[in-house]
Image: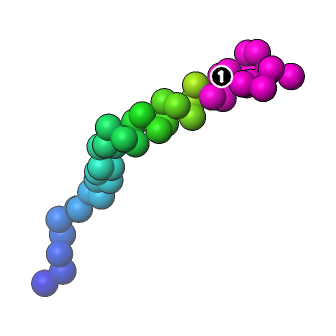
Amino acid sequence: MAETTVRRRVRHTPRPTDAERANAAAALQRALDRRDNGGSTGH
């Protein structure tokens, strides 16, 4: 018999680890710093 149930694909993304969150936060902060004041080098 043909299977009649509809299977929904639910994509469960793994929660980021603390290290990954910190890395992402640091990257975001660097990007904001570059945009706002020319970055760490100041030019």
Q: Is residue 26 left or right of residue 19?
A: right
**Which of the 4 quarters of the picture holds residue 20?**
top left
Q: Find the magenta span and give its range.
A: 30-43
* Viewport quadrant of the C terminus: top right
Is 7 included in the stretch rendered in magenta?
no
Instruction: Name the residue tied to disc 1.
Output: 32
* Viewport quadrant of the N terminus: bottom left
**Which of the 4 quarters of the picture holds residue 31?**
top right
Q: Secondary structure at mark 1?
A: helix
Query: Badge 1: how crowded within 10 Å, few (<14), some, or many (20+)?
Result: few
Vertical order, 23 against 8 (above or below): above
Residue 19 is situated, as x and y percent measured from the top left of the image, at 36, 41
Residue 42 is situated, as x and y percent measured from the top left of the image, at 80, 20
Vertical order, 25 against 36 (above or below): below
Amino acid residing under circle 1 = Leu
Q: Residue at x 74, y 24 (%)?
A: 39
* Foreground of the two, 28 or 1: 28
Residue 14 is situated, as x and y percent measured from the top left of the image, at 29, 49
Q: Farthest front residue? A: 41
* Foreground of the two, 5 or 13: 13
Q: Residue at x 76, y 15 (%)?
A: 37
Residue 40 is situated, as x and y percent measured from the top left of the image, at 72, 24
Q: Is residue 19 left or right of residue 10?
A: right
